[in-house]
Amino acid sequence: MNPPKTVTSQRLDKFTATPEVEVVIAPNAGACFGVVRAIKLGQQAAKRGKGESVRAFGALVHNPRTIRELEQSGVKITDDPDEIRSGTVILRSHGVKQETEAEFKRRGVQIVDATCPLVKKPQRIASGLGQKGYFLILVGNAEHPEVKGVVSYFGRPDYLVTYQTEDLDKIPAHVQKVGIVAQTTIEVKVLNTIVEACRKRFSEVLVYNTICDATSVRQKEAEVLAKEADVMVVVGGKNSSNTTKLVKICKEFQPETYWVEDKTEINPLWFVNKKKIGVTGGASTPQEYVDEVGTFIAELVESEMVAFHPPASSALPEAYGTD
Ligand code: SF4
């Protein structure tokens, strides 16, 4: 006779511990406050906008399920500003170009600004640096919509977007006053390296650390949990770069790491003979999806589908992306 089995989760208090299996959800797993706010504003706009066009300019959040739900509630997602000529537009959490917003206003489109306050900050700083005649060094990815938005607030041509010190050679020799701003999601060590190189070269260097710690907090927690767990499950959109990074970190410390968008992708065989199952989720994954996956795994374990019917090890699936 098997001993009675229950499952524990640090975050989902509703489970109780079993001597055999523990399901642990990282404390901050799932959506950051900026994404939660954007989704809420999107839902509210959909409710108010019955009968008229409600569009989100750019994916409000990189999670296909949330986007599907928003679309079902009447919000159409588009990347084409020309499609937005009336009704309401919701601006994504990582911001839009200043001129794009101005054009929406000119067209009489009602604006719901879901830009995260932590993204507004580098926008404001860039604008101030532009007015004071500083050369802007924006540490980040030039192709990222947030970076394009921040550059538009700078409003001048004398700027460089980079995350590599070698690129500093592209700055004209006469430049002496630089202001450094960071994309919110870059790693602090990347910013520090650029700052150090700039201090050696320019006579005046203003540094604004505009990095948001939502991503780094989730990454640190994922590392700690992956070191302890026998298997890791990461919940998040396959189009989400912060979830991609979490998967990478988890795999580094726990090769048996699986990436799912929701509980339907869970394979019970992943948990056979595992004692500690770790669950985390990217900053663009609503917390309820993460909790739903944790609950589902706990129920699988409780139902004894997992631990007491181990298949031959050769039948186990490969961990996600172990190639
Ligand atoms: S990651 Fe940070 S900056 Fe980006 S939306 Fe979330 S809280 Fe805002």
Image (cartoon, rainbow, N blue to C red):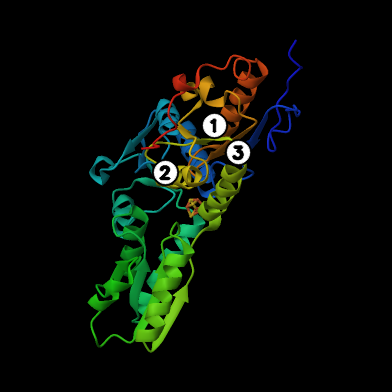
Element class at badge 3? loop
State the mark number for residue 306.
none
State the mark number for residue 229.
3
Element class at badge 2? helix
Q: Is residue 227 left or right of residue 67?
A: right
**Kind of residue sitting beneath label 1:** Tyr
Residue 237 lies, with reference to residue 272, above or below; the image says below
Mark 3 or mark 2: which comes first in sequence? 3
In the picture of the structure, the residue carrying the numbered disc 2 is: 244
Element class at badge 1? helix
**Kind of residue sitting beneath label 3:** Ala
Q: Residue furthest top?
A: 1
In the picture of the structure, the residue carrying the numbered disc 1 is: 289
Q: Nearer the viewer, mark 3 or mark 2?
A: 3
Q: Nearer the viewer, mark 1 or mark 3?
A: 3
Mark 1 or mark 3: which comes first in sequence? 3
